[in-house]
Image (cartoon, grey):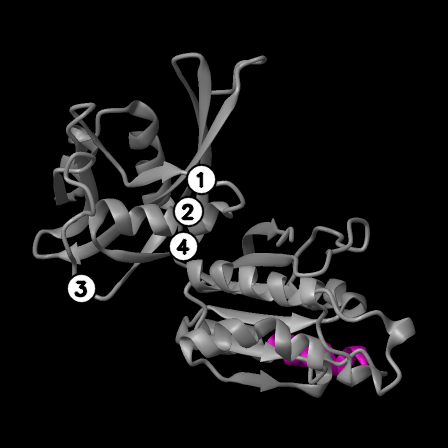
Amino acid sequence: MAAVVGRPVVRAAGLVVWRQGASGTEVLTVHRPAWQDWVLPKGHIDEGELPPVTACREFTEESGYRGVAARPVAVMDYPVKNTTKRVHWWVGRLIGSSSRPPADPREIDAVVWRPVADALAVLTYADERQVLTKALALGSSRTLVIVRHAKAAPRETWTKADSLRPLSERGQRQAKKLRELLAAYGVGALMASPAARCKQTLRPYSQSRHVKIELRPELSDEAVRPSDLARLMRELRADLLADSVPRAICGHLPSLPAMAASLGWGEDIETVPMKTAEALVLHLDARTGSVQASERYRCLL
């Protein structure tokens, strides 16, 4: 359903999560006592929060489970009083098996894993039944986040080797913001150019999750051969398909289009260049490695 012109838009985000149980595939549903409805976990996007970060936060707050975002499913609009509610949905991947009670039982008073048919029968709203059906039909995917390094100190005031040029204060704030996005996708492997600004862009996430940053000279902006960069990206895709661990790779503006093109991504980012600390999230088919969906996020700080 499209947004109604003139109505303010209220944005929200959520995850569609399932697991394999004794009776087959089970979908997580929650009950809201204030509305007396059964829904998929979702919630409002806080100011300055990126939608996939919201989706994961709200999933944990409402269900007590931890999940990360995988492939995007849909963006659904529907009227609520005098507003349009716009919900961004992702397939969610469950992390671990432990749970805790939801934070506020006045908001969520029941968390139930249901067989697919039961979930489709009990969900109160048609749009969420549609989202669930669409999510279940999507094939398994693998996530790769391509990042342009955060804002660096100005070239004109830097007197040492350019590879040593660090992030500016703004860039350091962007790197901390980027940490939230990488966590939302459950990134478990990091790769970067040896340049200081690329290493520092990934460092907050690396330190918070104890993930080592692999430095690759093929990602440098200093006279790297295109064939070496293409070979690196092919290796990266093969590793991603083999172990399914979501990855993030940080490089420089001139090489970003070639990095994406090596994976078969059709959109031309030379036409709309990536800004500092911008992330291109690619979702690859788990069998073929072809790009099935993409997202772009800027860390506006």
Crowding near the residue tagged with mark 2, few <14, some 14–19, many ≥20 C-alpha atoms within 10 Å: many
- The answer for how far apart the CA atoms under marks 4 and 2 are is 10 Å
**Disc 3/disc 1 C-alpha distance (Å):** 26 Å
**Label 4 vs label 3: CA separation?**
17 Å
Element marked by disc 1 = loop
The numbered disc on residue 45 is: 1
Mark 3 highlights which residue? 97
Q: Earlier in the sequence, mark 4 or mark 3?
A: 4
Residues at circles 1 and 4 in contact by the CB criterion of under 8 Å: no
Mark 4, residues whose alpha carbon is within 10 Å: few (<14), some, or many (≥20)?
many
Q: Amino acid at mark 4?
A: Ala
- Earlier along the polypeptide chain: callout 2 or callout 3? 2
**Is 56 drawn above or below residue 186 in the view shown?**
above
With 12 as the anchor, is 22 left or right in this view? left
Q: Residues within 10 Å of mark 3 (few under 14, many from 20)?
A: few
In the displayed structure image, the side of residue 290 where residue 123 appears, left or right: left
Tell me, yes or no, whether the highlighted magenta stretch contains residue 229: yes
Residues 232 and 16: in front is: 16
Depth check: give the residue in front, 267 or 200.
Answer: 200
Q: What residue type is disc 1 on? A: Ile
User: Which residues make up the magenta segment?
Assistant: 224-234
Which amino acid does the dot numbered 3 rest on?
A: Ser
- Say which amino acid is labelled 2: Thr
Q: Nearer the viewer, mark 4 or mark 2?
A: 2
Left or right: where 204 falls relative to 169 = left
Taking depth in this image into account, of 246 and 168 the one nearest to the observer is 168
C-alpha distance separating marks 1 and 4 = 15 Å
Q: Which residue is mark 4?
A: 69
Report, in whole angstroms, how far the alpha carbon at label 2 lies from the one at label 3. 21 Å
